[in-house]
Structure formats: C-alpha cells, structure tokens
C-alpha cells in the first residue's frame, strides 16, 4: 500500500470515528437542553417539576425528575400535592429504533408511595422502555404487574396488562390491553374480560382524532353483555370541527330479557374550530371561566357569538336495537343554519327533525291503537312510525301541521338571553344629583 493510500485510509477512518462520536454527542447535548427547557417551563401549573437531577454523558446519561401533582386553581395552603419521581437511563448509541433509547421507572413518594404499594405490592415499580426516533417521535412501552387490592370493602383483581405510547409535538397514540378486571364486595360483583383502549389523537389540544374502548364481555349481578364498543371520532376540516360518539352492544341480557345489535350515535358537526380552541384555552387558564379578566370575558362572548352565527348541527343520528319480539329505531337532529348577516336568530335559523319506528310485537295491539288514535303516529308495514319536523316556523308531526307559537316564543326568549350575554348592558352611572339625594327620614330622631 502506497503512502498516499495509507493517508487516505487513515483520513476515512478518522472521519468515520468523528462521525461515530458526533452522533452520541449530539444526542446527549440535545437531551440535556430539552430536559432543562422542559423543567424551566413546568415550574407552575398542575404538573410541576420540583427538581431535575441530570447527569449527561457521551454514550450514556441518567437522572431523576421529581414531580408534584397539584390543583393550580386551588391555593397551595389548602392542598397536599402528590409527589413522585421518574428515574431514567438513556443510551446515546443510535440504533434502528432511533437516536436514543431509554429505560424509566416511576417512583412514588410520601403518602402516594403507600397508596401505590397497596395496589402493586411492596418494592414493585411501574417501569418501561422507550426510544426517540430520528424524526422526533417518542415511543414508550410499559408492562403493569397483576394488581390485587381492596377499597372500602370491595376486592379488586386486575390481570397483568401492556401498553405503548407514541407522541410528537402535537399528536399522541396510546394502546393498552387488559385480559380481565374483577371487583367483588357488598353483595355485588363485576367481571370484565378482554379490555382494549386505542387512542390516536392528531391534535392533543383540540382533541381531534379517534378514541375507542372495547370490552369482550361484562357480567354483573343483574346484567350481562357481549361485544361492547365505545368510539369517539373528531376531525377539523377547513376550520370546522366535527365530533361523533358511538356505542354498540352485540348482546345485552337483563331480567330474562335479551336485546341484540344495540347502537347509539351522537354527533356535533360544523363547529367553528378557532372559537372552540379559544374557549378551551380561556377555560383552562381561568379555572373553568371562574376567574376571567375583562379581556378574556370579551373573547369568550366573541367566540360564543361566532359559534352561533356560523352554524352547527347537534343530534342523535342513530338509536336502534332488536329483540325476539321486534325492532326499534329512532333519530333526532337539531341544525342551526349560518346567519346571513351575522346576527343570532334561533327563531329564524333553527330547524329540527326526528322519528321513532317500532316494528314486530314490541307494542301490543292496544298500545298500537292508542298511538294511532292520537293522530301523531302512522301505520307502516309490521309496525308504527311517529315523526316530526320544525322548519321556517312550521311544526309538523306525522305530516300534520300544528301551531308552533309556543316553539317560537321559547326560541325568541332564547335569542334575548343570548343577546344579553353577548352584549351585556353597562350598569347606569350614578350622577352627582343622585348621590346627593338622601333619605328624608335618615336624620329624623328615633321615636320615643
């Protein structure tokens, strides 16, 4: 090998060595900076960083973060905040998992420690592993041991469970699964099997994304059900926020009765997203709107006014179920159309509709005849149907037009209440003349 080749080889090896050291150095420096920034920004609020002890290293770092959980809306003298710390070790050697990998353990303190140890056992810890991806994505895995404890005469048994958390600056994904949860005591029992929680939030602040909770079976002293699924879905499109909550049960049994394929869906659509975000921020900062500044009060009124003026829809699109004797289904929707001139006028822009359908033998002949005799229900194949519609000041029930005067009156009163909230009248100023007026009997001697 020539001298030039040896020099080039040495240069390449030196460059690779420098690069190999640069990555863990950058990882360690980044972690040190981010932890200090996080601690400095969490000195107030509900979750407070009380102490940070971080030991940075080139290939490995470790430390402890002590937290205090408190209520920022309550005076410090009136609360005893729970304390706990997180102990961690971080490897700065890059891998396929990411820029750094870490192990963590949750260490409760004081009364919190005693409470946690009653649940998980003396000496056991809540711990897990994680990694920071090259794109800034944080992932964590956690294993919870079996939990056995009692509270107020009720015994609880929770089988071991697993979970994972993935998060970046705005989004969060959380998955958790549990085989069985049992509670017994005071003459009652609850047995749940096959629990799973799946959360995928695109924006944690606004709550957009999906959350679903599934349970394979639930059995109590009086009811049993199979195939429970609760799911919420929220999205923001073109500054409009929509949310839907659905619940379904495959089989429900109670008091020797059985219902199948139960479904319930509730929805809110078309909300002005910037106004919702403004209300969330002010509500959090003012402890539920109870301690607002004048400027915040004005922003709240503006946000509420914008929500009502830009329109929305609220309702229950689906309610249905079936049993051995028949089926039932219903829906109810309320829609507020956008105001053309920006004024709030429920009486003018509100519309609503809904219906109830019962088929089979859920109603006996006498009940069916009574419903039909009112004129508010109509006969359909294998059942009866009742429906209503309110629009443009007209109220119809089963195609019969009724007097909507009461509805108009209620909506007009609501419009006045909204107007008084959005544009409160200032209290009349006390003039100098009014201040000089005195009670003519104020200085009169008391009767003897």
Image (spheres, rainbow, N blue to C red):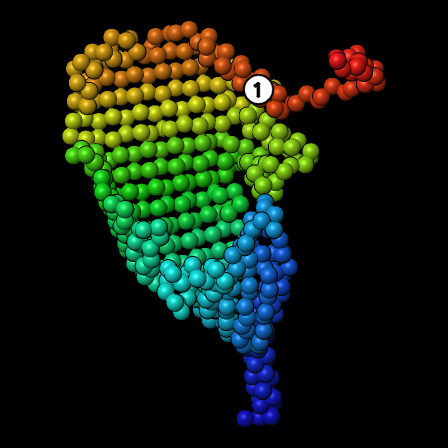
Q: Position of residue 39 (x, y in %)?
A: 61, 60
Name which residue lies at 35% across and 50% down.
152
Q: Is residue 101 above or below residue 380?
A: below
In which quadrant of the rendered view does residue 310 lie? top right
Name which residue lies at 33% across and 57% down.
149
Mark 1 lies on residue: 417
In which quadrant of the rendered view does residue 33 lie? bottom right
Say if residue 132 shows up in the picture.
no
Name which residue lies at 51% across and 46% down.
203
Say if residue 309 shows up in the picture.
yes
- Is 171 on the left or on the right of 418, as rendered? left
Name which residue lies at 22% across and 27% down.
327
Q: Residue furthest front?
A: 448
In which quadrant of the rendered view does residue 334 lie? top left
Q: Position of residue 51 (x, y in %)?
A: 60, 64
The kind of secondary structure element at disc 1 is helix
């Amino acid at each position: 090998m020539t001298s030039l080749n040896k020099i080039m080889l040495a240069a390449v090896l030196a460059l690779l060595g420098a690069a190999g050291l640069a990555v863990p150095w950058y990882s360690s420096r980044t972690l040190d900076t981010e932890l200090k920034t996080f601690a400095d920004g969490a000195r107030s609020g509900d979750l407070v960083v009380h102490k940070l002890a971080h030991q940075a290293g080139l290939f490995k770092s470790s430390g402890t973060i002590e937290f205090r959980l408190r209520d920022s809306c309550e005076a410090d003298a009136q609360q005893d905040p729970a304390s706990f710390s997180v102990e961690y070790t971080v490897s700065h050697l890059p891998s396929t998992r990411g820029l750094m990998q870490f192990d963590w353990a949750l260490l409760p303190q004081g009364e919190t420690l005693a409470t946690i140890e009653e649940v998980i056992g003396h000496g056991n810890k809540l711990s897990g592993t994680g990694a920071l991806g090259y794109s800034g994505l944080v992932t964590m895995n956690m294993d919870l041991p079996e939990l056995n404890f009692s509270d107020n005469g009720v015994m609880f048994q929770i089988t071991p469970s697993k979970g994972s958390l993935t998060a970046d600056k705005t989004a969060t994904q959380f998955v958790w699964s549990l085989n069985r949860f049992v509670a017994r005591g005071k003459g009652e029992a609850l047995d749940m099997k096959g629990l799973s929680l799946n959360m995928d939030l695109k924006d944690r602040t606004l709550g957009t994304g999906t959350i679903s909770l599934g349970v394979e079976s639930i059995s109590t002293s009086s009811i049993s059900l199979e195939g429970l699924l609760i799911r919420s879905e929220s999205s923001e499109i073109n500054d409009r926020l929509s949310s839907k909550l659905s619940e379904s049960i495959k089989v429900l049994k109670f008091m020797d009765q059985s219902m199948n394929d139960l479904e319930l869906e509730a929805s809110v659509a078309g909300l002005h997203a910037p106004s919702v975000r403004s209300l969330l921020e002010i509500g959090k900062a003012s402890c539920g709107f109870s301690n607002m500044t004048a400027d915040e009060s004005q922003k709240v009124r503006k946000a509420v006014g914008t929500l009502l003026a830009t329109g929305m829809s609220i309702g229950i699109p689906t309610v249905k179920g079936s049993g051995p004797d028949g089926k039932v289904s219903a829906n109810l929707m309320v829609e507020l159309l956008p105001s053309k001139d920006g004024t709030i006028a429920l009486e003018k822009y509100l519309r609503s509709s809904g219906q109830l359908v019962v088929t089979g033998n859920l109603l006996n002949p006498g009940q069916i005849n009574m419903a039909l005799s009112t004129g508010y229900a109509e006969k359909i194949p294998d059942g009866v149907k009742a429906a209503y519609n309110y629009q443009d000041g007209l109220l119809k029930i089963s195609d019969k037009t009724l007097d909507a005067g009461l509805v108009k009156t209620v909506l007009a009163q609501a419009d006045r209440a909204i107007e008084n909230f959005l544009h409160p009248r200032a209290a009349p100023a006390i003039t100098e003349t009014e201040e000089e007026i005195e009670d003519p009997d104020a200085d009169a001697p008391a009767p003897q």
